[in-house]
Image: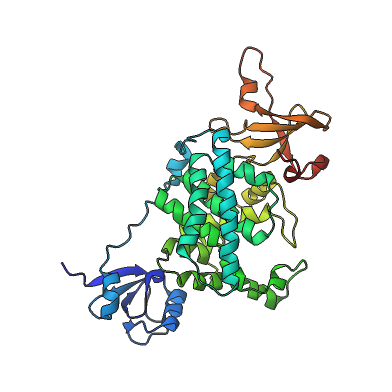
Amino acid sequence: MQIAEREMTVAELRPGMFVSRLDRDWVGTPWLLQGFMIQGDEDLQALRQYCMRVTVDVDKSESFVRPVLLRPPRQDYVMPDLEAAKKGVPRPVVVSLEEELPRAQAATDAAYSLTRDILDSLRAGDRLDNAQIEAAVQPVMGTILRNPDAYFWLEALRGRDGYAYTHAMGCCALMAAFGRHLGFPDEALSDLATGGLLMDIGKTQVAPALLGREGPLSAEEAQEMRRHVAYSVALYDQMEGASPIVRQILQSHHERENGSGYPHGQAGDAIPLFGRLAGIVDSYDAMTSKRPFQAPVSRYEALQVMYRARGELYQADLLEQFVQCLGAYPVGSLVELSTGEIGMVMAQNQVRRLFPRVMLLTDADKQLLKEFRSLDLRDTWAGPDPARISIRKGVTPGSYGLDPKELYL
């Protein structure tokens, strides 16, 4: 049976396609006639501004684009049921932390190098390379699927240069971990991780002096910084095989629940789901990273700040799931125990989230130990004479002279 019409996302459109219907009224758009042929980039840019999806008339489209229109449509993902996620069991950790660490180290080293290459090539005027992106994303995603704690433990210990590179990698891993927690299929996890990696590629088109500014920006400079979203989408749309889900992430990760975000001031459910996920991940990684104009906060503190903004800046139930995903004290957090000792969270306990495995760094007097040792807090609550050690509070990196990146654990 011949296909007469095809519903498509704006990211899938190409010159030569005939648009017969929009996902909105024609009134208020640049098109006087109801139905038009896409002539080039100007039409595509306008469609991106006014629509998310359109209907394309196959017969009225140019013959050279019909093979694209006649391909089977990409299947939509099954959206995660947040209520089910709250009650369900997340994907199991399939290998131990110790077993995954060597693979995680190889994955992160390769991904960091490739991420530098991707962003540097964009600054030089090159286009995105799909194979290069996949080579960066897939090893990180593999580690996250097997044991996410291994990735986050390694990255907490490493002092890498360049916020642009570390933020891209951090968002890539966090998006994959969040999607894993919510029960997305692997295909969706790949899009989530890719969206995290490419989230801020538009900043390669912003002046380096502006990105590295330590002081406040003028109104004009702030506006130029916000244009990185449009730059990101434009760069991504040049790539063959662009995913509409990745495009959603690039387009919507600065929108906020109360409509205070940008570029469109969308609010609530008007923000695409993947954009809402990305907004949470982007905020968390930015807050916990060292930037020219801001010192990092602890992972624990970042979650506390974001939790207080639930329902205002972030969708409340999604943010609650993000906290469940990372744990109240995420891997890499410095914590003070009920004994007075300082430790660093190594791995989460999926059953008792407040009792993770920690690496003890100091004694009760806050003196650095000669040899660090691992302690599973859950084990201290078992047996005939339990010690019952718990976490007293989170500790800001740098307290007591402790910086995980300088300890070489």
The answer to whether 55 appears left or right of 174 in the picture is left
Q: Position of residue 202 (x, y in %)?
A: 57, 70
Q: From the viewer's perspective, is residue 28 above or below residue 107? A: below
What residue lies at 68% left-to-right and 60% top-to-bottom? 162
Q: Residue furthest left?
A: 1
User: What is the basis of the colouring in this image?
Assistant: rainbow
- Residue 149 visible in the picture: no
Image quadrant where one finds the C terminus: top right
Q: Quadrant of residue 228?
A: bottom right
Image quadrant where one finds the N terminus: bottom left
What residue lies at 33% left-to-right and 83% top-to-bottom? 37
Q: Position of residue 118 (x, y in %)?
A: 56, 64
Q: Position of residue 317 (x, y in %)?
A: 52, 48
- Residue 219 visible in the picture: yes
Q: From the viewer's perspective, is residue 136 above or below residue 54? A: above
Q: Residue furthest top?
A: 384
What residue lies at 46% left-to-right and 63% top-to-bottom? 130
The answer to whether 19 appears left or right of 186 in the picture is left
